[in-house]
Image (tube, helix red, strand yellow):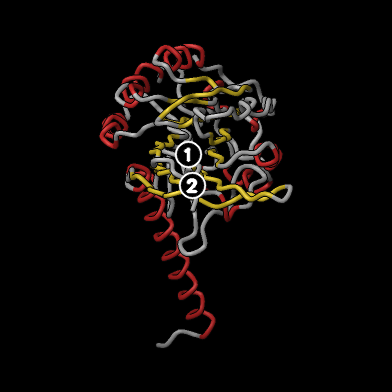
Amino acid sequence: MTDSPLASAARKAAWLAGGIAGTGAAALAYGCLIERNLFGVREETVPVLPAGSAPLRVLHLSDIHFVPGQDRKVRWLQELAELEPDLVVNTGDNLSHPLAVPAVLEALKPVMRFPGVFVPGSNDYYAPVLKNPFTYFTGPSKHRHEPEKLPSGELFGAFTDAGWQDLTNTNSVMQLSGLRLNFSGVDDPHLRRDQYQGFAETPAATPGGGAFPEVKIGVAHAPYQRVLNQFTGGGAEIILAGHTHGGQVCIPGYGALVSNCDLPTRQARGLSSWAHGGRRVPLNVSAGIGTSRFAPVRFACRPEAVLLTLTART
């Protein structure tokens, strides 16, 4: 006895639905168990230094989102010291749990011996909360209730004790490798705590020279357009940010579906550029190292640290 066309179509639809569900479950399992732990280093070369400058190796860390018990992440972060960077830039969201500070500091201790700067992210101040992931498609995420506070003071105090400069709504200058690094940083724009202060004044040239050549670096956690415009208009020659997680769950061959801010999704990960006021500036957005503990999945978006080699402009 043969099936009717209707019965045959129903069976095919059921088989297809089952296949899609099975594929979705397999992809979710892969993203939760495997890809979120496939840590790697993305390397970029960016010609932004004054002519004649020696290369400067910058390790960009972002969105560690540490939860106690992530031993694999600890070991990998410690191994990053083997890259021997000249400078470390930490763009925030180090925590995802109120008891995470000791393990984060253990993980970062080897790289904290290098000169560094940092800015906060929202998950340095507040613990993540459980939310419907589909709300990210309606715009940047928002806290509906007062979230649990995290021990950010303990974390940032350890960073500054190690010699890292705090760029929270301020500027700072560092002389390193024959360069005057002029930083401008902001508190987390995602929480609207950013108060742009501009860059430190560049010393006037003196007869006979002797001053270090300068490069201006903008640093923020969340790459909102208003902040990128301020950095670019203020003379930044490169901007570093995180926050987006690269989209976290992406479509292979297409990329990010969301950036969790007003940055175009095509720029949610990687080295691109930002144009404003007639200037175009390199923009590096890290896909980050971790995830919220309530959404421990990555798909087509592996976790990363970034090693930027800044070279002389040609």
Q: Residue at x 57, y 56 (%)?
A: 266
Residue 295 - label: 1
What whole-number distance in Å separates the C-alpha atoms at marks 1 and 2? 10 Å
Question: Is 56 in front, or is 306?
Answer: 56
Q: Position of residue 195 (x, y in %)?
A: 69, 25
Of 102 and 236, nearer the camera is 236
Question: Does residue 83 appear anywhere in the picture?
Answer: yes
Q: Nearer the viewer, residue 45 or 129?
A: 45
Disc on the earlier residue, 1 or 2: 2
Q: Amino acid at mark 1?
A: Ala
Residue sitting farthest toward the bottom: 1
Which of the 4 image quadrants contains residue 168? top right
Callout 1 touching callout 2 (CB < 8 Å): yes
**Which one is closest to the eye, mark 1 or mark 2?**
2
Question: Which residue was labeled with disc 2?
Answer: 248
How many C-alpha atoms fall within 10 Å of the one at disc 2: few (<14), some, or many (≥20)? many
Q: Secondary structure at mark 2?
A: loop
- Where residue 268 appears, as percent x and y from the top left, is 55, 49
Residue 141, percent across and down? 64, 37
